[in-house]
Image (spheres, grey):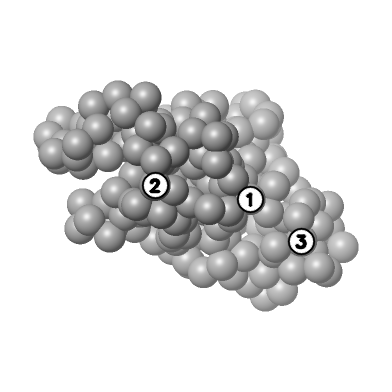
Amino acid sequence: MSVSLRLVTSLVAVVVLGSVLNAFEVSKPVCLAPAKPGGGFDLSCRLVSNSLGATKIIDKPMIVNFMPGGVGAVAYNHVIGQRSNDAEMIVAASTGSALNIAQGKFGANYTVDSVKWLAALGADYGAIIVKADAKWNTLSELVADLKANPKGFALGSGGSIGSQDWMKAAIIAKLAGINPKDMKYVAFEGGGEALTALLGNHIQVYPGDIAEFSGQLSSGKYKVL
């Protein structure tokens, strides 16, 4: 089953988006962010809105709607099942979304072929983020602590086990010589929620992406290892 859902990913060129949108009159453009505000999906939707506005494809800002749940699964199933003919909607996604779909985490009946993969905004870089007053100042210090006590602190990000954010945590575990299953990991509905949890000390390490975090650096509340 192929529907009109369009996912913005980090795999193909954003210029494709213009040729598709020119095929119809855009009256109420909507970008769906499958997470809570403040994370990478939120940023992706706003970048799309700015790009389409700058190129005169749309003459009004896109509405950004948020639909957290299942680390993207709720939004994916909602749009395919209920809004499959909505040609004015795009949905922010990532390579992590594609990975979850491939693993069947968004539903056994839906695959990567259930949607149209439209365009990309660009690539991002992973970052290991902690609070400004955290005891670690280098990645080596963090790895040593994790090796000594795998459950001594919690890592958390906007992705379930097996996602690209979880993989950043798993890489740290591998550096520490431990099984990723032995570390304490918490999944959140987006990077914004994970950063809030970090600030509240509900987690102590956030393996996220630098683009969604860059605006927070000047606050002095966090540091990147």
Q: Amino acid at mark 2?
A: Asn
User: Which residue is the site of mark 2?
Assistant: 149
Secondary-structure class at tag 2: loop
Measure how far apart labels 3 and 1 are at the Cα level. 11 Å
In front: 112, or 181? 181
The residue at 23%/27% (across/down) is 137
Decide if residue 201 is in sight here. yes
Q: Amino acid at mark 1?
A: Gly
Q: Is residue 99 above or below residue 177?
A: below
Secondary-structure class at tag 1: loop
The spot of residue 167 in percent (x, y) is: 57, 41
Decide if residue 63 is in sight here. no
The residue at 20%/58% (across/down) is 200
The spot of residue 160 in percent (x, y) is: 56, 57
User: Which residue is the site of mark 1?
Assistant: 162
Considering every residue shown, the one lying at the far bottom of the view is 82
